Image: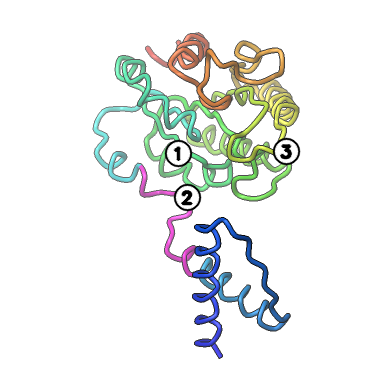
Amino acid sequence: MKKVILLSISVLFVLCVTAQNTGDSIAFTISGENYKLLEKHFADKAKAKKRKEDWAKFWRYEKANDTITKPVKVVFYGNSITDDWPRKRPDFFAKNHFIGRGISAQTTSEMLVRFRADVIDLKPKAVIILAGVNDIAANNGIISHKHILGNIQSMCELAKLHKITPVLCSVLPANHFRWYPELKPANDIILLNRMLKEYAKQNGIAYVDYHSVMKDEFNGLPENLSYDGVHPNAEGYAIMEDIILKNIFKYLK
């Protein structure tokens, strides 16, 4: 039975490719039993792939972390916005002896899992946390604002426990995601930022507001500061650098 189903999948794939190349549409019917077998086949393949993955991407900075010899002052921790920052503005990190530990597409759940390896074990004076936009984009599935905040709260609590000062950053403005065009994230980002700001205020944590400075009239990231409405360009990062330096000056001494 398995061989028959696999053969059917191969034939179906060939038919679909042929139809795509010729511009013709294709329609077919499949029994409920065979559909379940087909669904299970692809689910099993997905599970097998997951078992071979480093979900939190510990590998990304493992070697770099092992080669650190000088004391770390500040770790910038986040997703693609933090990941891109040292590449687009290397002088900012080099002259201030900052370390970037951002990973593209990551959610707060993944960031929380690798917090020990990429922050605590480096023993910095402070950690700059910029996170949450990929949770709103459902990169790792649906998650409520309450649980996004909870993940970030846990990072802050872990940092404090290890005598690392957390600095919370607002999520940057965005009113669309090119990888999820039907979603309208502007108001969700504003709500999350409000929750982050309130948490920071109640717990004596520095809160860095990028959003109000960088937003346009649609609560998005304007074209002059971004190439896709989500990720800053060099000019956008320059604004962020001015803002963040004012908030972490005491940790640079």
Left or right placement of residue 132 versus residue 236 in this view: right
Residue 45's spot in the image, x, y percent?
A: 51, 70
Magenta span contains residue 57: yes
Badge 1 crowding class, 10 Å Cα cut-off, few under 14, some 14 to 19, many 20 or more, is many
- The residue that label 1 is drawn on is 103
* Disc 3 secondary structure class: helix
Q: Quadrant of the C terminus?
A: top left
Which residues fall within the magenta stretch?
48-60
Question: Which residue does the image show at 46% across and 25% down from the upper left?
Answer: 126
Residue 199 in view: no
Question: Which residue does the image show at 54% across and 38% down from the upper left?
Answer: 158
Badge 3 crowding class, 10 Å Cα cut-off, few under 14, some 14 to 19, many 20 or more, is some
- The residue that label 2 is drawn on is 56
The answer to which of 18 and 57 lies nearer the viewer is: 18
Relative to residue 250, is residue 24 depicted above or below? below
Q: Of the residues under marks 2 and 3, which one precedes in the sequence?
A: 2
